[in-house]
Image (cartoon, helix red, strand yellow):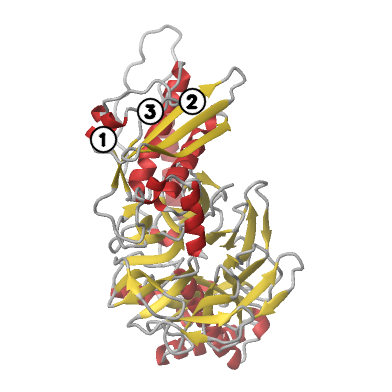
Amino acid sequence: MKTVISSLVTLLLLSACASTPTQTANNTPAPTPEPRKTTPRPQIHQAPLPGSVAGSREEFQKMAGDRVHFALDSYALSYKARSILSKQAAWLNRYPRVRILVEGNCDERGTREYNLALGAQRASAVRDYLVNLGVSPSRISTISYGKERPIDGRSNEEAWAINRNAHSAITSGAVS
Amino acid sequence: MRFILVFALMLLASPAWARLEIDITKGHLDPMPIAVPDFLGTTDPERETGAKIAALIAQNLTRSGLFKPLDKASFIEHQSNINVQPRFADWRIIHTDALVAGQITIDKDNRMQVAFRLWDVLSEQQLVGLQLASTPENWRRIAHKVSDAIYRKLTGENGYFDTRIVFISESGPKTDRVKRLAIMDQDGANPTFLTSGNYTVLTPRFSPTAQQITYMSYATRTPSVYLFNIETGRQEALGDFPGMTFAPRFSPDGGKVIMSLVQGGNSDIWVMNLRTRQRQRLTSAPAIDTSPSFSPDGAHIVFNSDRGGSPQLYVMNADGSGIHRISFGEGRYSAPVWSPRGDLIAFTQQYKGKFHIGVIRPDGSGERILTTAYLDEGPTWSPNGRVLMFTRETRPGAGPHIWSIDLTGSNLRKVATPEDSSDPAWSPLIQ
């Protein structure tokens, strides 16, 4: 296969040279070169290697999920959220050099300052849960974005539910 | 006290003054007719500036909702000297109640003198005579000061035209919004950006001297409250708090900033003395305590808390004692701001999927809803406590814009800004 490709490349290079218009001393236009028939190039298909690298952001996302969601005006962790956080904790305990920033987010159906406070409660709820499962508090920072960082720009119930979340963003220590 | 003040003013003013007065507490379907001819001048630059000043005064008075400047084409008398009495009969024919007469001189050193008189057309009395000096480039502020003088004389209250608005200018898609600190005149003129947009800034508020702004910034890893000096452009993080600080406001004397601090996920209210840098914790409930705002006498603080299960308005003494709830209507209440007059608190109410701006007395009585929209939030008071500006999204997906409404619930207007805009805060009257 490799030799086929390299000989194809050589062929293409040669044909490219041949079709370059040659400079002429007088000003008569160079004759239009004959169109050449080129052999169709074989396509190359690319696909990600199945399975993520151990300790990478992708693996964290795939094995645990990096976002948990909340009910309206609440920072209580649902059963589903707790299950995601247990997986986050297990993964974080396996890679002790990884540090995360938990970002608390709210939907747009609240006032700005109240949402900043609510986002802080959500981020803190996630942090506390991870700490209880053995992740060192020194590895987890928190921030509240209130309603300033929606990930779904629409204005409907579905988007609001998506935007009520806490995102565990890996800040350092992951395998890239 | 008020009676004595009114009595003293009556002694000073002509007897007719009491008659030509607008009751500002009512919604006005019949604004007062007023004539604002171009200010006089002897040279072309003087006349040009005179026309611009008169047009801006008329625009200010129209936007207040209290006045109806008349069409200049209807004027019969064309004065050539403002120091001669107008022919009042000519002004009565076109049914104006008040007449503004102004004159401009610009000397060879580019100094501008503006003289103006306000006349009561029916009683044929002068109500105001004033002279202002500046440079021709400053014509807008001159027009605002003249507008303030007219408003003050005819309503009996201070104006708000020579003021500025600090706000957040927004651009870009909702999921990647750029938010910059910006400032403009109250009428939307001279918009200027104060931060670059490399980091998010929120909720700016003026100091009582209008020289400083406090706001919240995401410039560093821990979002916190900052001070911005308008004169020097200097920015400074306020205090080294062990957590996120937000929702800042100045005390009425400008000596303190009150704000929320997050510790362990919980927001409480703290106050910081700007001179000594000492800080004091005022609330300690295991609930959200935020959006604090001082009463104008500095004795009380209104704030937002969900300690009772849903966000509501609470009032406490300035030392954190005596906390009691004042909002008992339906829905959720937040973002309270005490009026500069002290008599009312403006707030945001969320009820049945809509947002409203309303006002309530500090004792919790007299609640009144002024606006309704998909999103209305974050009211700010004009320095005379008669007008509110706020952030509005008219419908889902529409970008935010600054709007204004009179305390009476009338005169709803969109404020012109170059981009989408939010979080307005009104300055005091500029000295």
Query: How far apart are labels 2 and 3 at the CA level?
Result: 10 Å
**Res B119 quadrant in image:** top left
Q: Residues within 10 Å of mark 3 (few under 14, many from 20)?
A: many
Q: As displayed, is residue B44 above or below residue B93?
A: above
Disc 1 is attached to a residue of which chain? Answer: B
Disc 3 is attached to a residue of which chain? Answer: B
Residue placed most toward the observer, A77 or B218 = B218
Residue placed most toward the observer, B396 or B156 = B156
Name the residue tied to disc 3.
Answer: B38
Residue pictured at 55% horizontal, 60% vertical: B205
Q: Position of residue B41 (x, y in %)?
A: 45, 21
Which residue type does callout 1 highlight?
Arg
Which residue type does callout 2 highlight?
Ile
Residue placed most toward the observer, A143 or B282 = B282
Q: Which mark is residue A134?
A: none
Q: Position of residue B426 (x, y in %)?
A: 49, 56
> Helix, strand, or loop for circle 2?
strand
Q: Which mark is residue B104?
A: 2
Q: Position of residue B347 (x, y in %)?
A: 42, 71
Q: Earlier in the sequence, mark 1 or mark 2?
A: 1
Nearer the observer, disc 1 or disc 3?
Answer: 1
Quadrant in which the C terminus of chain A appears: bottom right
Q: As displayed, is residue B56 above or below residue B266?
A: above
Name the residue tied to disc 1.
Answer: B92
Residue pictured at 34% horizontal, 81% vertical: B331
> Helix, strand, or loop for circle 3?
loop
Q: Is residue B174 visible?
A: yes
